[in-house]
Image (cartoon, helix red, strand yellow):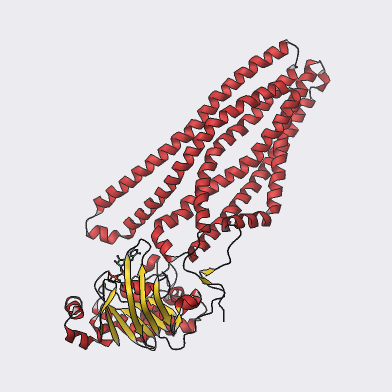
Amino acid sequence: MTDPAQPGASKPAPTATLARRLWRDWLWRRRGMVVLALVLSAITAAAAASYAGVIAWTFDKLNSGAADFFPLAPLAVVGLAAIRGVSLYLQTVQTNRLALNVMQDLQNAMFAKLMQADFARLQAEGTGSLVSRFTNDITLLRETIVRLSNNLMRDVLTVIITIGVMLSLDWMLSLLILVVYPIAAWPVIRIGQRLRKTSSQAQAQMGEVTGQLEESFSGARMIKTYGLEDHETERARKSFFERLRFLLKITENKARVDPILEVVGGLAFAGLVAFAGWRMLEGETSLGNIIGVLTGIAVISPAIRALGTLNAVVQEGFAVLERVFTVLDTEESVTTALDAPALDVTAGAVELDGVGFAYPDGSVALNKISLKADPGQTVALVGPSGSGKSTILNLLPRLYDHQSGRITIDGTATSAVSLASLRRSMALVSQDVTLFDDTVRANIGFGDLDAGDDAIIAAAKAADAHDFIMALPDGYDSPVGPRGGNLSGGQRQRLSIARAILKNAPILLLDEATSALDTESEQRVQTALEHLSQGRTCLVIAHRLSTVRRADWIYVMEDGRIAEQGRHDDLIACDGLYARLCRMQFEA
Ligand SMILES: Nc1ncnc2c1ncn2[C@@H]1O[C@H](COP(=O)(O)OP(=O)(O)OP(=O)(O)O)[C@@H](O)[C@H]1O
């Protein structure tokens, strides 16, 4: 049986990058919106450009003494202003709607992609930096897209149509302007390029700052008890200073744009006045034409100015877009074939055979590890810190892929089955409990999203959590608070055990809590864990004497290898590493 709804299923080689496909699909789906925005932009631009023609016509008529024409001129201007006002409003709303839709699509695509991303990648990037992608990056991108769609369509059209009108009035004068304006663009483009680089660095640094702030606030207990307030303040001060440096650099670059445009604009205007005066004295152009061309400049100047600064904004936005597209186009490395069969756990035998693994940074964590847990057995992993115990628990649900050897469940290689089915077959109960800021019911319910109330309550009873839940103000509907902050450590652990019971997976991966709970709490957690491990194959990183005594088999790890194995009494009798660890770790 194949299992199509699986994370990490490798798809056929794409013909275009995901980002490009997304963009194409998006344009096609929203073609109506795009066309409407373009039409409204064109009307707005045409209304603006018409000012030059109307003014030229009016002054030439007045100059020729057609006094009866006079009331028509202001009426024409008012009419144009009204058309422009209405179309400007509609166009602004339409282009903003368009931009916000792009943003939402990108946000959704990026979040969905990151949810499917390799665990290694999420670990390496860090929470702060990931969050910053959705806060800073997306905000910056929204500003860019809004500016881009507002200014690019409308202003480019305004410039093109107005220049057309100006050329028809006096092509020589107009050409002079067309020669001078591009000269202004060159330094602006250079500034934009520099800005893009700085902006990219500033975004990355913002991610670091966010991560650091999170650490400082979430570690408040440790910071206070260790008296690290000054140290943290100093660390934050350095990051804020670094941020200031980047922002100042960006501000300086942006601030250069307007003065450059001002000076070049002034020069152009002076040249124009001199040239126009000379042509008029020579009788080669009319007063109406000159005033019309000047009106044209007045119309295109703000548009060109907006386009000039737009370049800087766009460069900034491109830096962000590059980061977003990199996320979208990164291929996962933990994958299975699309038609990979679902894992069928018949008994629950877990086996590692000569497994070797090094983390992405090259540090070797496991060296030819062979171990097995027979169906229904509890196998304990014991060893000094850094010996590779957690790594084994990471490899079983394929959070990371081993590089050599074989990992099998009931004889089937974990790499040959769908990731979703593999992960469905295991429940992980870790010492750092993850609770979402939701109700007690929802937090247990994550074990099985289809479970009804009865199943949730039964799981809570088996985890010895029902009584304390009923004592909460709203029972199962009580919020657990951010990170489960409304509950005690033991209560949080019992909720996570209830969640695992509800998941009802045949294989249990358990990382026993090292942090001390009070005796009563610990006893309750222990009882809950005993319920949970009944009838399941259980691999446990053991920190308690009672666990190792009860275990069917113990693997003692050292430097990524199995140093000893056996049952508790036999290993104690050998008086080797295990006996030493027992004396230090458990009996203390
Ligand atoms: N994400 C990671 N990136 C790089 N190296 C890592 C990573 N996680 C663990 N390691 C390294 O792999 C080795 C095994 O670590 P592991 O966490 O499996 O040990 P452990 O026995 O579970 O330790 P502890 O009891 O302290 O949790 C260690 O040398 C550790 O430094």
Q: Is residue 466 above or below residue 488?
A: below
Residue 27 visible in the snapshot? yes
Q: Is residue 339 left or right of residue 477?
A: right
Q: Is residue 403 left or right of residue 551?
A: right
Please name the residue shown 68% across and 51% down the image: 33
The furthest residue to the top: 281
Quarter the C terminus occupies:
bottom left
Residue 508: image location, x then y, percent: 39, 81
Quarter the N terminus occupies:
bottom right
Q: Is residue 273 above or below residue 88?
A: above
Residue 479: image location, x then y, percent: 42, 70
Quarter of the displayed picture in which ligand 1 can be seen: bottom left
Please name the residue shown 36% across and 57% down the image: 214
Question: How many numbered circles does the render carry?
Answer: 0
38 and 351: which is toward the camera: 351
Q: Is residue 236 left or right of residue 406?
A: left
Residue 98: image location, x then y, percent: 63, 50
Q: Is residue 341 above or below residue 24?
A: below
Q: Is residue 256 above or below residue 344?
A: above
Q: Quadrant of residue 84?
A: top right
Residue 423 visible in the snapshot? no
Please name the residue shown 32% across and 56% down the image: 216
418 and 44: which is toward the camera: 418
66 and 44: which is toward the camera: 44
Residue 405: image location, x then y, percent: 39, 76
Q: Quadrant of residue 183?
A: top right
